[in-house]
């Protein structure tokens, strides 16, 4: 917000007129120091924005919100657990099958267990690849939404935020920065006059 205010034509002109006067960084630092006082000027608009946002959050919340959270926690756990159990079953089948074949005790049962182990290994590999693809797709969906707050998609919330930001800029930050620039310019002119007037 401060950078947007520093781009305001009046402030840019004031910075340019004073020459060696207030630099952008000095103005930015002073505005950030006074941020609590500046934010208080547009407090009504900010509270209205928060109220509209909270109403939109309540309105958009599905009935089964607790179930949805549980499902979001359960699915990744299952994505790890199912291939792990498949890998354990594969190991048991192969160890038992090769053990029975090594001791030449009931070779047909040993061959059957080895074949079951191979099938379990293929199914486990397929499940692991499917789970990996699902996790990567879910992560990509989550990242796509990281840049924007989902509540700001609602037009009423977006409008309330715009009103608050405009009020903050027009009634707080821009006048504050203009006042600082004018004070700096007045101080600079006073210094020049006293330098020219002295013998």
Image: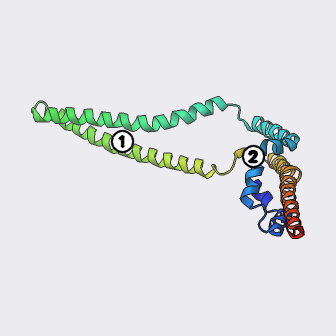
For disc 1, the neighbor class at 10 Å (few under 14, some 14 to 19, many from 20) is: many
Q: Secondary structure at mark 2?
A: helix
Q: Residue at x 89, y 67 (%)?
A: 193
Q: Give me the residue at 70% from left, 47% from top.
A: 149
Q: Residue at x 13, y 31 (%)?
A: 106
Of label 1 and label 2, which has the lower sequence position?
2
Residue situated furthest front in the rendering: 199
Residue sitting nearer the eye, 56 or 129: 56
Nearest to the observer: residue 13 or residue 137: 13
Residue 107, horizontal then vertical, whole percent: 14, 35
Which residue does the image show at 27% across and 38% down from the upper left?
116
> What colouring style does the render use?
rainbow
The residue sitting at the left extreme is: 104
Residue 33, disc: 2
Quarter residue 12 falls in: bottom right
Which of 7/23 is in front?
A: 23
Percent coordinates x, y for residue 134 in the rendering: 50, 46
Provide the residue designation for mark 1: 124
- Compared across the picture, whether 22 is left or right of 128 comes to right
Whole-Å distance between the Cαs marked 1 and 2? 59 Å
């Amino acid at each position: 917000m401060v950078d947007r205010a520093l781009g305001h034509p009046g402030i840019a002109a004031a910075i340019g007129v004073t020459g060696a006067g207030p630099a952008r960084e000095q103005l930015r630092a002073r505005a950030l120091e006074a941020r609590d006082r500046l934010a208080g000027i547009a407090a009504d608009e900010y509270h209205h924005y928060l109220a509209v946002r909270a109403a939109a959050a309540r309105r958009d919340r599905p009935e089964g919100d607790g179930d949805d959270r549980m499902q979001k926690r359960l699915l990744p756990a299952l994505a790890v657990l199912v291939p792990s159990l498949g890998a354990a079953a594969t190991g048991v089948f192969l160890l038992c099958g090769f053990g029975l074949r090594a001791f030449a005790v009931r070779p047909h049962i040993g061959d059957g267990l080895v074949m079951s182990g191979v099938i379990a290994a293929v199914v486990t590999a397929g499940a692991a690849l499917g789970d990996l693809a699902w996790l990567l797709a879910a992560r990509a969906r989550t990242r796509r939404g990281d840049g924007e707050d989902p509540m700001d998609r609602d037009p009423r919330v977006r409008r309330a935020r715009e009103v608050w930001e405009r009020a903050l800029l027009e009634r707080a930050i821009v006048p504050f920065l203009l006042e600082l620039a004018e004070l700096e310019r007045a101080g600079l002119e006073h210094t020049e006059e006293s330098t020219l007037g002295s013998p």
